[in-house]
Amino acid sequence: KNQVEQSPQSLIILEGKNCTLQCNYTVSPFSNLRWYKQDTGRGPVSLTIMTFSENTKSNGRYTATLDADTKQSSLHITASQLSDSASYICVAGTGGFKTIFGAGTRLFVKA
Amino acid sequence: DTGVSQDPRHKITKRGQNVTFRCDPISEHNRLYWYRQTLGQGPEFLTYFQNEAQLEKSRLLSDRFSAERPKGSFSTLEIQRTEQGDSAMYLCASSFQGDSNQPQHFGDGTRLSIL
Protein backbone atom coordinates (compact mmCIF):
# COMPACT_ATOMS: atom_id res chain seq x y z
CA LYS A 1 0.00 0.00 0.00
CA ASN A 2 1.32 3.44 -0.96
CA GLN A 3 1.73 5.61 2.10
CA VAL A 4 3.68 8.53 3.53
CA GLU A 5 4.34 8.85 7.26
CA GLN A 6 5.62 12.00 8.94
CA SER A 7 7.13 12.63 12.34
CA PRO A 8 6.79 14.25 14.71
CA GLN A 9 3.08 14.97 14.53
CA SER A 10 3.73 18.37 16.12
CA LEU A 11 6.72 20.33 17.29
CA ILE A 12 7.28 23.46 19.37
CA ILE A 13 10.56 25.38 19.06
CA LEU A 14 11.88 28.78 20.07
CA GLU A 15 12.42 31.47 17.48
CA GLY A 16 15.92 31.34 16.05
CA LYS A 17 16.38 27.61 16.66
CA ASN A 18 16.79 24.96 13.96
CA CYS A 19 14.57 21.92 13.52
CA THR A 20 14.29 18.83 11.34
CA LEU A 21 11.10 17.14 10.20
CA GLN A 22 11.06 13.53 9.05
CA CYS A 23 9.22 11.70 6.29
CA ASN A 24 9.17 7.98 5.46
CA TYR A 25 7.48 6.88 2.28
CA THR A 26 6.43 3.59 0.77
CA VAL A 27 5.30 4.20 -2.79
CA SER A 28 5.82 2.33 -6.00
CA PRO A 29 6.76 3.47 -8.49
CA PHE A 30 8.54 6.45 -6.98
CA SER A 31 9.21 9.54 -9.08
CA ASN A 32 9.70 12.50 -6.75
CA LEU A 33 9.47 13.77 -3.18
CA ARG A 34 7.89 17.14 -2.41
CA TRP A 35 7.62 19.28 0.68
CA TYR A 36 4.82 21.80 1.06
CA LYS A 37 4.15 24.47 3.68
CA GLN A 38 0.53 25.07 4.64
CA ASP A 39 -0.47 28.06 6.72
CA THR A 40 -3.71 27.78 8.69
CA GLY A 41 -6.70 28.33 6.43
CA ARG A 42 -4.60 28.48 3.27
CA GLY A 43 -3.64 26.05 0.53
CA PRO A 44 -0.27 24.25 0.53
CA VAL A 45 2.67 26.06 -1.06
CA SER A 46 5.53 24.15 -2.65
CA LEU A 47 8.92 24.38 -0.92
CA THR A 48 11.05 21.78 -2.71
CA ILE A 49 10.80 18.95 -5.22
CA MET A 50 13.45 16.24 -5.54
CA THR A 51 13.64 13.40 -8.02
CA PHE A 52 15.03 10.02 -6.98
CA SER A 53 18.48 11.04 -8.25
CA GLU A 54 18.71 14.15 -6.06
CA ASN A 55 20.00 14.04 -2.48
CA THR A 56 19.38 17.59 -1.33
CA LYS A 57 17.62 20.76 -2.36
CA SER A 58 17.45 24.13 -0.66
CA ASN A 59 14.97 26.97 -0.73
CA GLY A 60 16.21 29.79 1.46
CA ARG A 61 16.25 28.60 5.08
CA TYR A 62 14.60 25.29 4.08
CA THR A 63 16.79 22.34 3.08
CA ALA A 64 15.31 19.01 2.08
CA THR A 65 17.24 15.75 1.86
CA LEU A 66 16.29 12.50 0.19
CA ASP A 67 17.62 8.98 0.65
CA ALA A 68 15.91 6.89 -2.02
CA ASP A 69 17.52 3.70 -0.70
CA THR A 70 16.00 3.97 2.76
CA LYS A 71 12.94 5.83 1.44
CA GLN A 72 13.40 8.68 3.88
CA SER A 73 13.36 12.43 3.51
CA SER A 74 13.89 15.26 5.93
CA LEU A 75 13.18 18.98 5.93
CA HIS A 76 15.59 21.13 7.90
CA ILE A 77 14.60 24.65 8.88
CA THR A 78 17.41 26.97 9.87
CA ALA A 79 17.10 29.97 12.19
CA SER A 80 13.34 29.59 12.57
CA GLN A 81 11.04 32.61 12.42
CA LEU A 82 7.56 33.14 13.80
CA SER A 83 6.25 32.98 10.23
CA ASP A 84 7.51 29.41 9.95
CA SER A 85 4.61 28.33 12.18
CA ALA A 86 2.59 26.13 9.83
CA SER A 87 1.98 22.54 8.78
CA TYR A 88 4.68 20.93 6.66
CA ILE A 89 3.45 18.21 4.35
CA CYS A 90 5.58 15.55 2.69
CA VAL A 91 4.28 14.26 -0.65
CA ALA A 92 5.55 11.33 -2.71
CA GLY A 93 4.98 11.31 -6.45
CA THR A 94 4.27 7.90 -7.94
CA GLY A 95 4.56 8.81 -11.59
CA GLY A 96 2.38 10.81 -13.91
CA PHE A 97 -0.08 12.89 -11.93
CA LYS A 98 -0.42 10.67 -8.86
CA THR A 99 0.80 11.87 -5.47
CA ILE A 100 0.49 10.50 -1.93
CA PHE A 101 0.25 13.06 0.87
CA GLY A 102 1.43 12.67 4.44
CA ALA A 103 -0.65 13.97 7.34
CA GLY A 104 1.84 16.75 8.00
CA THR A 105 3.92 18.00 10.92
CA ARG A 106 2.46 20.96 12.77
CA LEU A 107 5.27 23.37 13.71
CA PHE A 108 4.83 26.08 16.33
CA VAL A 109 7.57 28.70 16.62
CA LYS A 110 7.47 30.64 19.90
CA ALA A 111 8.99 34.06 20.58
CA ASP B 1 -0.80 37.29 -8.75
CA THR B 2 -2.69 34.96 -11.11
CA GLY B 3 -2.61 31.89 -8.92
CA VAL B 4 -5.32 29.27 -8.45
CA SER B 5 -8.58 30.88 -7.38
CA GLN B 6 -11.41 29.14 -5.53
CA ASP B 7 -14.90 30.39 -4.82
CA PRO B 8 -16.51 30.62 -2.36
CA ARG B 9 -13.94 30.58 0.44
CA HIS B 10 -16.50 29.47 2.94
CA LYS B 11 -19.87 27.71 2.59
CA ILE B 12 -22.29 26.89 5.38
CA THR B 13 -25.34 24.88 4.48
CA LYS B 14 -27.90 22.56 5.98
CA ARG B 15 -27.68 18.81 5.62
CA GLY B 16 -29.39 17.61 2.47
CA GLN B 17 -28.70 20.72 0.41
CA ASN B 18 -26.64 20.76 -2.78
CA VAL B 19 -23.48 22.86 -3.03
CA THR B 20 -21.21 23.80 -5.92
CA PHE B 21 -17.65 25.05 -5.74
CA ARG B 22 -15.63 26.69 -8.49
CA CYS B 23 -11.92 26.55 -9.25
CA ASP B 24 -10.04 28.74 -11.72
CA PRO B 25 -6.60 27.24 -12.36
CA ILE B 26 -3.47 29.01 -13.57
CA SER B 27 -4.26 29.74 -17.19
CA GLU B 28 -1.46 27.76 -18.87
CA HIS B 29 -1.97 24.69 -16.66
CA ASN B 30 -3.80 21.82 -18.32
CA ARG B 31 -3.91 19.54 -15.27
CA LEU B 32 -6.45 20.18 -12.52
CA TYR B 33 -6.98 18.29 -9.28
CA TRP B 34 -9.54 18.31 -6.50
CA TYR B 35 -8.65 17.28 -2.95
CA ARG B 36 -10.49 17.09 0.36
CA GLN B 37 -8.71 17.92 3.60
CA THR B 38 -10.00 17.40 7.13
CA LEU B 39 -8.49 18.87 10.27
CA GLY B 40 -5.05 17.51 11.09
CA GLN B 41 -4.80 15.46 7.91
CA GLY B 42 -3.12 15.89 4.58
CA PRO B 43 -5.16 16.44 1.42
CA GLU B 44 -6.92 13.36 0.03
CA PHE B 45 -7.18 12.99 -3.73
CA LEU B 46 -10.69 13.21 -5.19
CA THR B 47 -10.36 13.59 -8.94
CA TYR B 48 -8.06 14.69 -11.76
CA PHE B 49 -8.61 16.38 -15.12
CA GLN B 50 -6.28 16.69 -18.05
CA ASN B 51 -7.75 19.46 -20.15
CA GLU B 52 -11.49 18.75 -20.18
CA ALA B 53 -11.18 15.00 -19.65
CA GLN B 54 -11.74 13.56 -16.18
CA LEU B 55 -9.10 10.83 -16.13
CA GLU B 56 -9.21 9.57 -12.56
CA LYS B 57 -11.68 9.48 -9.71
CA SER B 58 -11.01 8.31 -6.17
CA ARG B 59 -13.37 5.84 -4.56
CA LEU B 60 -13.84 8.64 -2.00
CA LEU B 61 -15.87 10.37 -4.70
CA SER B 62 -19.30 8.85 -4.09
CA ASP B 63 -22.12 9.23 -6.58
CA ARG B 64 -23.22 12.35 -4.69
CA PHE B 65 -20.07 14.09 -5.94
CA SER B 66 -19.60 15.25 -9.51
CA ALA B 67 -16.89 17.36 -11.08
CA GLU B 68 -16.70 19.00 -14.45
CA ARG B 69 -14.20 21.00 -16.41
CA PRO B 70 -15.94 22.27 -19.52
CA LYS B 71 -13.61 23.66 -22.18
CA GLY B 72 -10.61 22.66 -20.10
CA SER B 73 -10.51 25.89 -18.13
CA PHE B 74 -12.34 26.37 -14.83
CA SER B 75 -13.76 23.42 -12.93
CA THR B 76 -16.76 22.89 -10.66
CA LEU B 77 -17.25 20.36 -7.89
CA GLU B 78 -20.85 19.66 -6.89
CA ILE B 79 -21.97 17.76 -3.83
CA GLN B 80 -25.60 16.66 -3.79
CA ARG B 81 -27.61 15.84 -0.67
CA THR B 82 -24.82 16.96 1.62
CA GLU B 83 -24.08 14.98 4.78
CA GLN B 84 -22.29 16.08 7.94
CA GLY B 85 -19.31 13.95 6.96
CA ASP B 86 -18.83 16.18 3.93
CA SER B 87 -17.64 19.00 6.19
CA ALA B 88 -14.04 19.64 5.13
CA MET B 89 -11.75 21.93 3.18
CA TYR B 90 -12.00 21.32 -0.56
CA LEU B 91 -8.77 22.22 -2.32
CA CYS B 92 -8.13 22.67 -6.01
CA ALA B 93 -4.68 22.49 -7.57
CA SER B 94 -3.29 22.85 -11.07
CA SER B 95 -0.07 21.97 -12.82
CA PHE B 96 1.52 21.84 -16.24
CA GLN B 97 1.57 18.46 -17.95
CA GLY B 98 4.93 18.81 -19.60
CA ASP B 99 6.98 17.80 -16.56
CA SER B 100 5.61 15.50 -13.85
CA ASN B 101 8.24 16.95 -11.51
CA GLN B 102 6.57 20.34 -11.55
CA PRO B 103 4.80 21.35 -8.35
CA GLN B 104 1.07 21.51 -8.01
CA HIS B 105 -0.18 25.02 -7.31
CA PHE B 106 -3.00 25.06 -4.79
CA GLY B 107 -5.82 27.47 -4.22
CA ASP B 108 -6.77 28.49 -0.70
CA GLY B 109 -9.72 26.13 -0.70
CA THR B 110 -13.42 26.24 0.05
CA ARG B 111 -14.27 25.40 3.64
CA LEU B 112 -17.60 23.57 3.78
CA SER B 113 -19.56 23.34 7.01
CA ILE B 114 -22.70 21.20 7.15
CA LEU B 115 -25.16 22.10 9.90
Image (cartoon, rainbow, N blue to C red):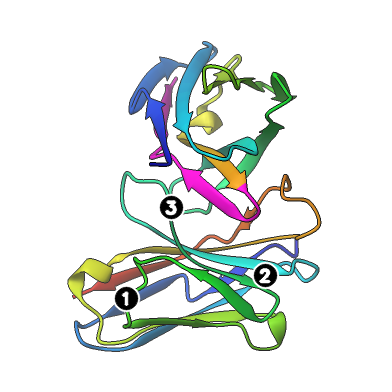
Extent of the magenta region: A95-111
- The reply, left or right, for residue B12 in relation to residue B78 is left
The one nearer the camera, B48 or B92, is: B48
* Figure quadrant of residue B32: bottom right
* Figure quadrant of residue A93: top right
The one nearer the camera, B61 or A84, is: B61
Mark 1: few/some/many CA within 10 Å (<14, 14-19, 20+):
few
Q: Output the chain of dot 3.
A: B
| Residue B53 image offset from top left, x and y in percent | 63, 79
The image's mark for residue B43 is 3
The image's mark for residue B25 is 2
| Residue B63 image offset from top left, x and y in percent | 33, 82
Mark 3: few/some/many CA within 10 Å (<14, 14-19, 20+):
many
Q: Say which residue label 1 marks.
A: B62
Mark 2: few/some/many CA within 10 Å (<14, 14-19, 20+):
many
2 and 3 marks in contact (CB < 8 Å): no
Q: What element carries label 2?
A: loop
**Going 70% across and 80% down the picture, which residue do you hit?**
B73
